[in-house]
Amino acid sequence: MGLLSKNNVGGDEDLAKDFHFPTSKKALIIFTRNPELGKVKTRLATSVGDESALKIYKFLLKHTAEITTHVQADKFVFYSEDIHKEDNWDNNTFNKKIQRGDDLGIRMYNAFTEVFSLGYEQAIIIGSDMYDLNTEDLDNAFTALKDYDYVIGPAEDGGYYLLGMKQPNQAIFSKKNWGRDSVLQATLEDLKDEKLKTLEERNDVDYYSDIRDNEAFQEFLPDHLDTDF
């Protein structure tokens, strides 16, 4: 799918510190992992193997880049480790940053704080592994923030695939068991007194069962895989 190797990585500090002038009041934050064999989609890999898991993740990265390109907001890609200068994320469309923090909650909070410090009035964060998401969904989520202070997209696994707000709120990123099915409920508890818009529940890609019956993923699956797994 064209994501680049380590030979194409470099200058991350220069890119991360580039001056940015907002062209919108809205910011879309996209969290992504650097695509490396054995380090992405590890739960999926237990069924399909590391190579297929990496191919699937690269496919999801490409899909995410395509659906976010035309979202009516300034876009920021936050890489897990290294910034790739030439990859699916076009440098003219996506501002490139590095995630900072010891756990997912801290990294997300820091990302929100950073974009709000640039003068944005609305910000939404998503991951890069949601096939069941499109451009209209994201534009509608920003529209919801006109009337609500928060917007959340519940995931079927007990987490969330989208979170939006009008100002940073550290509490909703603290004291969570990230990666567990309690994250959504704990976050909703934090927001119980806030003006919150809940979006349609969607499914992300973590396990073989999430893609087994989806034609888009069949080309990436190993021939020997037992379809009744």
Image: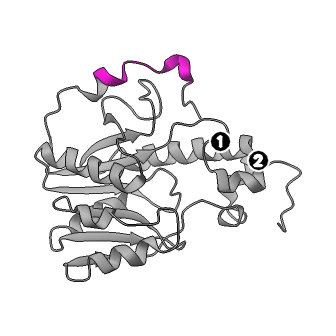
Image position, residue 195 (x, y; %): 19, 78
> Who's the residue at 24% across and 27% down the image?
17
Task: Judge the density around disc 1: few (<14), some (14-19), many (≥20) Cα neighbours within 10 Å.
Answer: many
How is colour applied across the structure in the image? Answer: one colour
- Residue 23 found in image quarter: top left
> Who's the residue at 39% across and 70% down the image?
153
Q: Indicate the quadrant containing the C terminus: top left, top right, bottom left or bottom right.
A: bottom right
In the rendered image, the residue lying farthest to the bottom is 193
Q: Is residue 121 magenta?
A: no
Relative horizontal placement of residue 129, taking residue 199 as reference (left or right): right
Quick check: can you spot residue 149? yes
Q: Residues in magenta?
A: 5-14
Magenta segment, prevailing SS (helix, strand or loop) = helix
Asked whether 99 or 156 is in front, the reply is: 99
Task: Judge the density around disc 2: few (<14), some (14-19), many (≥20) Cα neighbours within 10 Å.
Answer: some
> Who's the residue at 60% across and 35% down the image?
36
Relative horizontal placement of residue 222, taking residue 22 as reference (left or right): right
Image position, residue 40 (x, y; %): 60, 45
Asked whether 137 or 111 is in front, the reply is: 111
Which residue has dot 1 on it? 54
Image position, residue 63 (x, y; %): 50, 47
Q: Is residue 8 magenta?
A: yes
Which residue has dot 2 on it? 49
Q: Indicate the quadrant containing the N terminus: top left, top right, bottom left or bottom right.
A: top right
Q: Secondary structure beneath disc 2? A: loop
Amino acid found under the numbered disc labelled 2: Gly
